[in-house]
Image: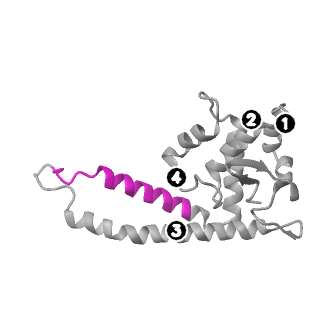
């Protein structure tokens, strides 16, 4: 059950069965407004922070800036921070994705390593010297690492595609009926 929500133009709707699962049920029920705007914002935050679905416009953002960008785009309260229900919801989505995709953990580790490599390239100082006055970084090592970047990115893209396929297959059949990940929430 990796697909808990449906996304339509950055608005996240819970599937019917999602509202039967704690903590999503509690998030929905604590919003007493008729339009459930706060709950929908919180579901959007959970979905966009965790989901590997292609419909998540934030899935490829670096982990160290993703939260700030999503909060600014989705949550309307400036001082909002995720409470225990939101944190549990994110943990549950990640758990479902891990269980639905054998490749998920490899992808997340590879993504974080690629982000660290990107940070290294931004911060490397080719003029830095060690105690003996020799360069800390040899130009050949840096150019070799840069040449390998294309392979790293291709492998990362391949892992991402595999995770998406695994998650789609896991959620495709629910209740003995095929469900499109793009189906309207009311039709499920």
Q: Secondary structure at mark 4?
A: loop
Whichever of callouts 4 and 3 sits on the residue coming sooner in the sequence is 4
Query: Where residue 163 appears, x then y in whole percent?
Result: 62, 67
Crowd around label 1: few <14 · some 14–19 · many ≥20 (10 Å): few
Name the disc covering residue 13, or none.
none
| Horizontal side, residue 113 vs residue 181: left or right | left
In this view, the residue farthest toward the top is 79
Q: Which residue is mark 4?
A: 61
Q: Which residue is mark 3?
A: 157
Which quadrant of the view contains residue 45? top right
Query: Where residue 21 appears, x then y in whole percent?
Result: 83, 48
Whichever of callouts 3 and 2 sits on the residue coming sooner in the sequence is 2
> 167 and 7: which one is in front?
7
Q: Which residue is mark 2?
A: 38
Estimate the spatial distance between the alpha carbons at disc 4 and disc 3, rounded to whole Å.
13 Å
Report the span colored magenta.
107-130
Estimate the spatial distance between the alpha carbons at disc 4 and disc 1, rounded to whole Å.
31 Å
Name the disc covering residue 29, or none.
1
| Horizontal side, residue 187 vs residue 165: left or right | right
Q: Are marks 3 and 2 in contact (CB under 8 Å)?
A: no
In this view, the residue farthest toward the front is 9
Crowd around label 4: few <14 · some 14–19 · many ≥20 (10 Å): some
> 89 and 29: which one is in front?
29
Estimate the spatial distance between the alpha carbons at disc 3 and disc 1, rounded to whole Å.
38 Å
| Horizontal side, residue 85 vs residue 187: left or right | left
Q: Is residue 84 above or below residue 9?
A: above
Estimate the spatial distance between the alpha carbons at disc 1 and disc 2, rounded to whole Å.
11 Å
Estimate the spatial distance between the alpha carbons at disc 2 and disc 4, rounded to whole Å.
24 Å
Whichever of callouts 2 and 4 sits on the residue coming sooner in the sequence is 2
Estimate the spatial distance between the alpha carbons at disc 3 and disc 2, rounded to whole Å.
34 Å
């Amino acid at each position: 059950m990796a697909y808990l929500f449906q996304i339509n133009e950055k608005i996240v709707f819970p599937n019917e069965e999602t509202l039967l699962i704690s903590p999503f049920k509690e998030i929905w029920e604590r919003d007493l407004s008729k339009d459930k705007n706060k709950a929908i914002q919180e579901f959007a935050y959970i979905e966009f922070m965790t989901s590997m679905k292609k419909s998540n416009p934030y899935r490829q953002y670096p982990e160290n800036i993703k939260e700030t960008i999503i909060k600014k785009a989705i949550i309307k309260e400036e001082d909002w921070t995720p409470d225990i229900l939101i944190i549990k919801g994110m943990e549950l989505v990640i758990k479902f994705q891990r269980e639905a995709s054998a490749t998920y953990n490899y992808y997340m580790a590879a993504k974080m390593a690629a982000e660290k490599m990107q940070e290294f390239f931004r911060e490397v100082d080719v003029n830095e010297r060690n105690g003996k006055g020799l360069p800390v970084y040899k130009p050949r090592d840096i150019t070799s690492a840069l040449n390998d970047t294309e392979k790293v990115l291709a492998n990362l893209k391949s892992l991402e595609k595999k995770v998406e396929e695994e998650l789609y297959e896991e959620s495709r059949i629910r209740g003995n009926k095929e469900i499109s990940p793009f189906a309207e929430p009311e039709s499920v």
